[in-house]
Image: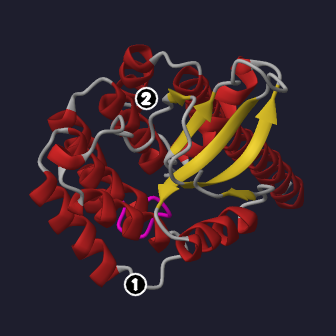
Amino acid sequence: MEIKNSKLKSKNYKSKFKVLLILTFALSLYFFTFTFLIKSYADSGITQIEKLFLEGQYERCASAAQTLIESRPRKGYEVYYLKGLSELKLNKFGEARQSLRNIIDNYPGSPRVFDAHVGIGDSYFLEGRKDSAARTYNEILQNFPDDKNIVIVKSRIRECSVNTADQERPKVEPGDIPRTESNSYISVQVGSFKNSRNADRMAKKLSMEGFDSFVEIPAGSGDRLYRVKVGKLQTKDNAEALASLLKTKGYKTKICPAQ
């Protein structure tokens, strides 16, 4: 009788152990699936926000970014960056600085810290506060002297030193996509398109990467191509440095000398 009870207890124990294993596996699977769905949602959200930015829907982009931020996505720094860029486009300079400052304060080890500092400098520049912009750019130069994109900051500092009273050409806003038929400076061409939308799309992508990009519209007589260019530089050395940087990012470059 005792042997029978012992076998029965052993059988019950094994049954309970199997049930426990099944529950543990089910919970693990649920947790993995839930985590995967959260990550997928965050990644798809970032993709959608990026799409809104590239389409020039800056109000919607900033709003969607704020909504996603509240869910604490994995790449929060990327969401804050897109939000900050959109706010710069909307001339909401104070809000843009706050969004970019969140990257520096909350994601100090992220790959967007350098870009956030540059964006803050750009916000001052676009606001007309050149002294604050120059001070910010010089701090970047001191703190990130070896950054691969430091040539961008050097270009910004030169822009700040230009006396606006002597500046007859239209001001080129960092990250903006002006259209011009004049070429009185040295630029680096990275693409040419028959379709203006394709040119705008590439220029906005470059804008997101921190480059001063613009689209040069076709002249009255010519090949009717929309050329995407970066930078308005004063020396060939600076243009060559910028071209080298763009090449490392996979762009085909062509230096276009001043006329």
Q: Is residue 25 visible?
A: yes
| Snapshot quadrant of residue 45 | top right
Q: Say which of 195 and 44 sits in front.
A: 195
- Between the residue at mark 2 and the residue at mark 1, the CA separation in whole angstroms equals 33 Å
Instruction: Tell me the mark number nearer the camera, choosing from 2 and 1.
Output: 1
**Residue of label 1:** 145
Give the amino acid type for the residue marked by disc 1 in the picture. Pro
- Residue 255 in the magenta stretch? The answer is no
Give the amino acid type for the residue marked by disc 2 in the picture. Leu
Residue for point 35% across, 60% down? 156
**Residue of label 2:** 68
> Is residue 25 placed above or below 153 in the rendered structure?
above
Q: Is residue 36 visible?
A: no
Residue for point 19% across, 57% down? 133
Q: Say which of 18 and 97 sits in front.
A: 97
| Snapshot quadrant of residue 163 | bottom left
Quadrant of the drawing holding the N terminus = bottom right
Q: Position of residue 50 (x, y in %)?
A: 57, 31
Pick whichever of labels 2 and 1 is earlier in the sequence.
Answer: 2
Marker disc for residue 219: none
Q: Say which of 213 and 162 sits in front.
A: 162
Q: How many marks?
A: 2
Q: Position of residue 107 (x, y in %)?
A: 37, 60
Q: Say which of 161 and 184 sits in front.
A: 184
Q: Position of residue 150 (x, y in %)?
A: 45, 73
SS under mark 2 = helix
Q: Position of residue 250 (x, y in %)?
A: 78, 59
**Image-based side of 47 in relation to 171, left or right:** right
Residue for point 31% across, 30% down? 87
Q: Which residues fall within the magenta stretch?
A: 107-112
Q: Which secondary structure dominates the residues rendered in magenta?
A: loop
